[in-house]
Image (cartoon, rainbow, N blue to C red):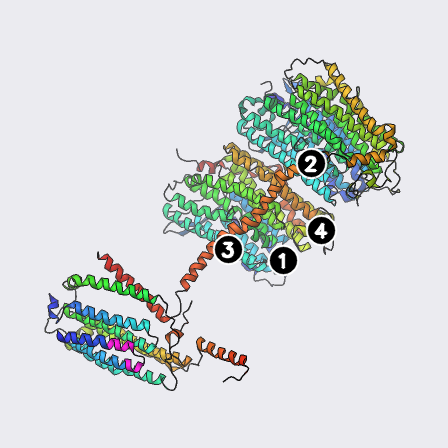
Amino acid sequence: MNSALLPVSLMSYVGLSAVIFFIGVGGVLLRRNPLIILMSIELMWNSANLLFLAFARVWLNNAGHIFAFLVITVAAAEAAIGLAIVVVVFRRTHHVDVDDVRLLKG
Amino acid sequence: MMVLLALVVLPIAAGFALYALPRADRTLAKGIATGVAAVTFLAGIALRDQSMSVRWLARPFTAAFHFADDGIGFWIALLLALCTLCAVLAANVPRLRDFLALMLLLEGAMMGVFLARDLLVFALFWDLMLVPVFLGLLGWGEHPSTAWRYLIYNFAGGLTLLLSTAAFGVAFGSTDVIGRSGLAHLGYIWGPWIFAGFAFAFLVKTPIWPLHTWMPPTYSDTPPPMVAVVSAVQSKAGLYGFIVVGMALLPEAMHAATYVMLWLGLISLLYGGFVALVQTDAKRIVAYSSLSHLGLILVAIFSFNALALRGALIYVIAHGLFNAVLFLVLGFIEEREETRSLPRLGGLARANPKIAGAFAIGALAALGLPGLIGFAGELIMLTGIFSAGYFWPALIALVPIVLAAAYMLRLFQDIMQGPEIPDVPIRRDLTLIEGLAVAPLVLAMVFFGVNPHALTTFDTTLYVSASELAP
Amino acid sequence: MILFWVLAVLLVGTAIFVVTQTKPVYSVVGLLFHFAFLAMLFITLNAEFLALIQIVVYTGAILVLFVFVIALLSSGVTPFDPGPDRMPRAVIPAGLLALAGLGLLVYDESRGSVARVASSPAAGGMVGQANAFGSVADFGKALFTTYLLPFEITAFVLMVAVIGVVILAGKETPYVPSRRQAALVEREMREAILRGGELE
Amino acid sequence: MPFAHHVMGVEGAYPLLYAVWLLPFAGAVACWAFGPQLRRLAGPLASAVIGAAFAGTLLMWGFATQSVGGALGAHVSLGAWTRGFDFGLLMDPLALIWCIIITGVGFLIHVYSIGYMDGDRAYARFFAYMNFFVFAMLTLVLSDNVVGLLVGWGLVGLASYLLIGFWFERPSAVAAARKAFVINVVGDVGMMFAIFAIYAHVGSIGYGDIFANVPALGGALFLICVGLFIGAAAKSAQVPLHTWLPDAMEGPTPVSALIHAATMVTAGVYLVARFWPLFSSSPDAQELVATIGGITALLGAILGTAQWDIKRILAYSTMSQIGYMIMGVGVGAYEGGVSHFFTHAFFKAQLFLGSGLIIHALHNEQDIRRMGGLRARMPFAFWAMTLGVLAICGIPGFSAFFSKDAIIYGALRHGHPWLFWTGIVTAGITAYYMFRMLFVTFLGEYRGDVDPSDLGIRHPELAGTPLPAAPSHGESAEEPHAPAWIMEAPVAILMVPSVFAGWLLFGERSPWHAFFAQQFRPEATVATGIPELAASAIVLVMVLAGIGIAYYRYASKPALENATGRLQQESVHMPAALSAAFYFDTALDILFVKPAQGLGTVFGRWVDPKVIDGAVREIVLSCRWLGHLFRSFETGLVRAYALIVVFGAACFLAYYAFARGL
C-alpha cells in the first residue's frame, strides 16, 4: 500500500484539507469584508493544493504537483483581479461591503 | 408554376415593395395594391390543377416547397383573393400604404397555408400569417393588449403545430404529404400526440370554445378591412387543417377525438349564439356569431360524413363571404358614425339605403336565409350530420339558427332601423368604390346560394374515405 | 507523524484566525503564518519546489498585494463599517445541510473507500521512483514536456489578469454613493427639513 | 302506398310555368333597382306583373289538372341544387289553387295598394317587396321538393318581415317584424329537422320519392310530421307560435290583407295538405295537428272578442279561421281545409281592404272605439265590411257557410266529436266578435272627437301612432273622406267570390270535389249519428246566437244611446287575461327570451372574462409567481450566491454519499 509512504494515513490529509476548506467557505459566507473573503478563498485554494500533493505522494504521480502549481498561478491571478475589483468598488462608494454591491439583483 | 408563384410570392413581394412608395400618396398605394390583389384573384381563377415543388430538406425528414391545388384549397384561395381584393378596395385608414402592404403580406401568407402540400411549409406559413395581423393590431388597433393576446394565443397554437409537424416528419419520414392518398397510417402510439398538437393549433385558430377569448377583442379592434379577411379566411385555416391534415393523415386519432370535438363544437355554437344575443358592440356580435357558426362546421367535420363535409365546405365559403360583407359594412358605418355601439346607432337605412341593403343581405346570409349561401351550407351540413346518425347534435345545432335570426336581426335593426339618432355628422351613402368592394361578395353569396352545386366541384368522399378506419 | 499533527493544529488555528479577525491586517498576518505552515507540510510530502513557490508567490507577492490594498483603503475613511447583515436566513439550514453531507461523506470515506481508490493508481500517470519523486528536476521535466500547453495557458491567464487589473483599477472611477448611503443622506435631509433647521 | 313517383306530374318544358314563377321576381328587381326612375309607375308596373302572372296561372289550368298515366299536373326539372338535392317545379291542382289565390287576390291587393300607398316615401320599395313576396310564395307552392318548399318558406318569411317593418322608423313595427321573423325561423327549424329525417331515410327530397317511401320512414314518420307541423304552426300562427300575427298588423293594411290573411299564413294548411300521405299514415300526428288547430280556432275567436284595434280583430279572426283550416286538414278533411283557405282568402282580403279604406280615410286611426257612425259617411266600406262579415260568419249562402261546414262536419265524420263541438262554439263566437266590430265601427255616433280617456283608452299615445310617412290627401283631419276608386274597385271585385265561391262546394258531386279527386285519397270515415243538415243547423243557431248577443250589446237602442259609456265600461272591466292575450307573450318571454338573454349575459359578462380568461390569467399569474419565486433567489448578495453554490455542492456530496449505499 502506497499510503505507507505517508507519515500518517491519507484520511488525515483529506480531513485536514476539508477542515481548512470549510473554514474558508465559512469565511466567504459569513464575512462581509471583501478582503477577508478573498483571503478565505486563498485558504480554499490551498486546502485543495494540499490534497493534490497528498495524493501525488500516495500515487507517486507528479501530475498533482503540476496541478498545484497551476492552482497557485490561477490563485495569484484571482487575487489580483479580486483586489482590483475591491479598489474599484471602494473608489465608487468609499465603502467596502460585499452586501452593498447588489447590481445582480433580479 | 407561374400561377402558384403569383398567388403566394407575388403578394408578399408586392407587400414589401409597397414600402418603397412615397408614404403620403394614398391613391398610388391603393391603386398598386388593388392591381396586385386583382392579379392574384385572376391567378386564383387559373389555379386549377397547378402544382410546383422545390426540394427543401433531406434530413431528418424530407420536405419540399410543394404547392398545389386540391379542390378545397382552390375555393378557399379564391375566397381569400376575392376578400383581399374587396378589403383593399374598401380600405380607408390612416397610413394607408403601410396598411395595404400588411394586407398583401397577409394574403400571401394565407395563400401559402391553403396551397401548401407540405406540412412543414404549412406550419411555416401558419406562423407567418400571424405577423401582419399582429402588426395591424399594434398599428391600427385600439388596445395594444389585444395584439399581444392575439399573438400569444395563436403563437401557442403555432408552437404545438410546429412540434407536431416535426414529430410527424420524424415518425413518418416526410412532411410532403398533404393531399396524398393511400398513405400508411401512423398508428396508435404517436398518432394521438401528434394529432393533439395539430388539434390545439386548429382549435385556437378557428377558434372553438374555450380557446376563443382572443377572438372578440381581435375582431373588434382590428381595422375592418383586415378583420374582414381574418374572419373570412384565417378562421378557416383550422377547419381546413382538420380536413386535410386530421382526416387524411391521422384518421385514427381524429376518430378517437370525435366526441370531444362534437362537444366543443356544440358548446361553441350555443355559447356564441347566446352571447351574441346580448352584446352591444356590433363587431363583437359578428365575432360571437362566428364562434357559433364555426362550431357548427367543426361538428360537421367530425361527423365523418361526405354530405356533411360538402356542406361544411360550402359553409366555409359562405361564412367567409358574409363575414367579409358584415365587417366591411360595419367598417363603413363606423367610419361614418364614429361608433359601433348599438345603443348609439339607429335609423341609418333612411339616409343610407345602399349600405342598409348590403348589410341586410350579409346579415340574412348569416342567419341562414334560404336562397343565400349560408342556408345551403347549413342545410347540407346538418342533413349530413343527421344522416351520419348524430340525432342529438343535429337537433341541438338547430337552436343557434333561431338565435342567429334573433341576434342578426337585432344587429341589423338596431343599426339600420328605428328612429334616426339625431346629431350624427355624416350620412353619406355608399360611395362607388365602397360599392365595388362589397358588390362581388354580395353577388357571390346570391349566386352560390341559388346554385351551390357550382361550388361542390371538389370530391369530399376522398377525405371521408381516407378517414375510414381499416377493418 | 507528530509533525503532521502539530502542523495540522497550527494550520487550522491560523485559518480560523484569518476568518475571524475584524481588521484585515491581522488576517493577512494570520494568512502569512498559515502559508508558512502549509509550506512545511508540503515539504513532508516531497514537494520541495512547491513549498518554495508557496512561500515566494503567496507570502512574497499576494500577501504584499493585500497589504498594499489595505493600506490604500484605510487612508482617511472607514471602509469596513459594518452595515446590517443581509445574508439570507437560509444560511443556517444550508450550512447545516452542507455539513451533514460532508459529514456523511467523510464517514463513508473513513470506512476505507479512499483507501480503495488509493490502491488503484490512475492509468497512464507518470509513476516515478520513491526516491526521485518530487525532485525539482523531475517536476521541471514534467512541466516543460508533458504539461507544456497548460503551462503556457497559465501564462496567458496571468497576462489576462494583468490586463484586467490595469483596466479595472487604472481608470478613474467617479464616486457614487451607494443606495444605503443615499437613503441615509436623504433621511437626514428630510429630518433636517422637518426640524426646520439647517442641514448639518 | 297509393302514390308513387307519378305525383310528380307530367314532365315537360312549360315555359308558361317559368313565366308565372319568375315574372314577379323580375318585377321586384325592376321596382327595387329602378324605383327612383319609375316613381309612381312602380305601382302599376308591379300590379301588371302580378296580373300577368295571374293570367299565366289560369292558362296553366289545363296542365295543372292534366292526368297522364296516373301522373297529375305539370312538372319541370330545374337540375341539382347540390348532389342528391334535385330541384324542380310542380304545378298540380293543389298548387294551382294556391297560385290562383296568390296571383289573383295578390293582383287585386296590388291595385288597391296603388291608392293606399300613394304618396308614401318608399312607394317603389313597397311594390318591390310585394312582388318579391308573390315570387317567394309561388316558389313555396310550386316547388316539387321539400328543400325548395323551405326556400320559399324562408323567403316569404323575409318578405313578411320586410313588409311588417316597412315603416321602419316606428319602433313598434321594427319589434313586430323581428318577432315575426324569429318565430318563423322556429318554424323553419322544425322543417329543417323534418328534412334531415326525410333525407336520412329516403335519400331524396322530392315529393314523389318521399310519398313512395312512406313505409320506409318507420318510427321517424311521427317526428317528421311534428317537424313539418312546427313549420306550419309558426307560419300559420297556431298556438303557441301565434303571438307574432297580431303584432304583424304594424305593416301597411294591404300587406295584412295579402300576407297575413290571404296567402302566407295559410302556407301551413298547404304544407299539411301537401304532405297528406305522411299525415294520413300517422294518426298521432293527425291528432296533434287537429287538436292544435281546434285550440287555435277557439283561442283566436275568444281573443277576437276583446280587441279594439280593427286590424287586431281581423288578425285574431284570421288566426281562428286558420285554426279551422288546420283542424280540417288535421282530421283528414283535406278538401274541406283547402276550401276554407280558398273562401277565406277572398272574404278576409275583402275585410282587410275594407278596414284599410276606413283606416286610410281616418288617417291611421285603428281603434274602433274612436270610430262609430261611419255607415252614413262611408257606405261603400260599410257594405264591403258587412258582406265580408256575413261571409266569415257562415250565413247560409255565403261562402264560409260551405267551407266551414265542410270542416266542422268533417271533424265529426273522421271521428273527432270534441273538435266538432269546438268548431261549433267557435263559429258562434266568431259571429259575435265580427258583428261587434261591425256595429261598433259603423253604427251610432262618430266618436273620433270624444276624449280618448272617456272611451277607456288608457294610452292614446300608443294607439294609432301618426306616421310621418303616412299617406295624406291634404284634407282636414277631422272629416273622413272618400277613398279613390282604385281602392274601391278591388274590394268590389272581391265581394263576388267572397259571397259565391262557396257554391263550388255544394253537393256530393261538387266541382271542388271533382277538382281534387286525384289529389287526395278519401280518408276513412265513421258513422256520425248527426246528419250534415242537422250539423249545419246547429252551427246556424250558434251563429245567430252570437249575432244576437252582439246586437244586444252594441246595436240595440240603449246600447247605441250610451255608446261612449258602455265602451268605457267594457274597456275598463276587460278581464286581464283577455287583454294580455292569455299571457302567451309573457310566457314565451319568460320561458325562452329571458333565459336566452340571461345565458348570453352570464356567458358574456361572467364566463368569458372571469372563468375562461380567469383560467388563462391564473396560468399567467402562476408563471409570474414562479418568476417572483426564482427572482427572490437573485438577491444580488454575492455571498448568497456563494451560499447557493455551497448548498448545491452539499447536495452533490449528499447524493454521492447516499449513492454509495449508505
Contact (Cβ within 8 Å) of mark 3 with mark 2: no
Subunit bearing disc 2: D
Q: Gap between marks 3 and 2, in whole Å?
A: 46 Å
Do discs 2 and 1 belong to a common subunit? no
Residue at disc 1, secondary structure:
loop
Q: B30 and D206: which one is in front?
A: D206
Q: Residue at x 49, y 53 (%)?
A: D616
Q: Position of residue C188 (x, y in %)?
A: 49, 79
D626 is higher (above) or lower (below) than A97: above
Q: In the figure, B275 relative to B392: above or below? A: below
Q: Nearer the viewer, mark 2 or mark 1?
A: 2
Decide which of tag 4 and tag 3 comes sooner along the chain.
3
Q: Which of labels 3 and 2 is toward the front? A: 2
Residue B414 appears at what percent x and percent y?
68, 47
Report helix, strand or loop for mark 4: loop
Disc 2 crowd, CA 10 A, few/some/many (<14, 14-19, 20+): many
User: What element does badge 2 sit on?
Assistant: helix
Q: Which residue is mark 1?
A: B93
Kindly indicate whether the residues beneath marks 4 and 1 are on one polypeptide chain: yes
Is residue D15 visible to the viewer in this orientation of the structure?
no
Secondary structure predominantly adopted by residues drawn in magenta: helix
Residue at image mark 4: B429
Q: Is residue B100 left or right of residue B157?
A: right
Q: Which residue is mark 3?
A: B151
Instruction: Out of C143 and D175, give the one closest to the viewer.
Output: D175
Residue D427: x %, y % from top left: 74, 24
In the image, residue B223 lies at what x, y percent?
60, 55
Residue identified by numbered label 2: D244
Please state which amino acid type lies under the numbered disc 2. Trp
Nearer to us of marks 3 and 1 is: 3
